[in-house]
Amino acid sequence: MTYSLPDDPFVLGGRTFRSRLIVGTGKYSTLPLMKDALERSGAEIVTVAVRRINLGEKSGESILGYIDAKRYMLLPNTAGCYTADEAIRIANLGREAGLSEWVKLEVIGDEKTLFPDTEALLEATKVLVKDGFVVLPYTNDDPIVARKLQDAGAAAIMPLGAPIGSGMGIQNPSNLRIVLEGASIPVIVDAGVGTASDAAIAMELGAEAVLMNTGIAGADDPVAMAEAMKLAVQAGRLAYKAGRISKKLYASASSPLQGISR
């Protein structure tokens, strides 16, 4: 049977989504521009930093006033947290404010690279899972850490493709393949996507979804790039499911001459 994107929904944390593109809301020059880019992306999950939200004001110029709660599932994140305790506190603050019991968990270990502190990340994951959160941890591309996060009850593994905001694309496809091979939960490539081809490569490797912010918000035309990323994720998934040809050292004729009389 021929593969079809509509017949292949994305299941995450017990919920079903049509889009495999998750987008962030930071770094846009204006909130109306962010709103237009979200719409063009086709995304159904939108991540927001709890620290960027004015929890006492959900209308007007608040970021929440530009995100249609009927159209998008809000995914709070713990961006800017450098300890497990801090991330746990911010996650609970978001839940108590009525944002969500889902959390994109970030525990940063280095201010310059924004690489995760995997020890603290694992600690926070265990606590939040026990407290009833659906935890989506941002991590590095270490297969051992990925396995530990899975064993800790994470709903997905979110390895970086490259440092946050770098736009360098998938820097270590071999490690990502190993993470994918060992995972029994969704793997979502998070961070480092710079253009549509990066998103397609992530999906062609077998990722269930891609999360990005800067790649869209930082583009010269964020709205057009949002659509490009949507199409790239779809194309990458389609190609992955279709199955690429094997790589060969030498040529193989498209119109073979075997069996043709000369």
Image (cartoon, grey):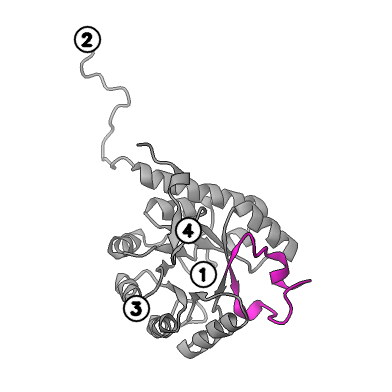
What is the distance, in whole Å, between disc 4 and disc 1 at their CAs?
27 Å
Identify residue type, mark 1.
Answer: Ile
Mark 4 or mark 1: which is in front? 4
Q: Is residue 181 left or right of residue 186?
A: left
What is the distance, in whole Å, between disc 3 and disc 4 at their CAs?
22 Å
The mark that comes first in sequence, 4 or 1, is: 4
Place of residue 185 in the rendered image (x, y in percent of width and height, measured from the top left): 36, 65
Identify residue type, mark 3.
Answer: Ala
Place of residue 116 in the rendered image (x, y in percent of width and height, measured from the top left): 44, 78
Above or below 74: residue 249: above
Indicate the secondary structure of the residue bearing disc 1.
loop
The mark that comes first in sequence, 2 or 4, is: 4
Place of residue 68 in the rendered image (x, y in percent of width and height, measured from the top left): 67, 63
Residue at numbered disc 2? 261
Residue at numbered disc 1? 164
Residue at numbered disc 4? 16
Q: Quadrant of residue 70?
A: bottom right
Indicate the secondary structure of the residue bearing disc 3.
loop
Q: Is residue 251 left or right of residue 5?
A: left
Residue at numbered disc 3? 152
Q: Which residues are magenta?
A: 47-74
Label 3, residues with CA under 10 Å away: few <14, some 14-19, many ≥20: some
The reply to whether the magenta stretch includes residue 169 is no
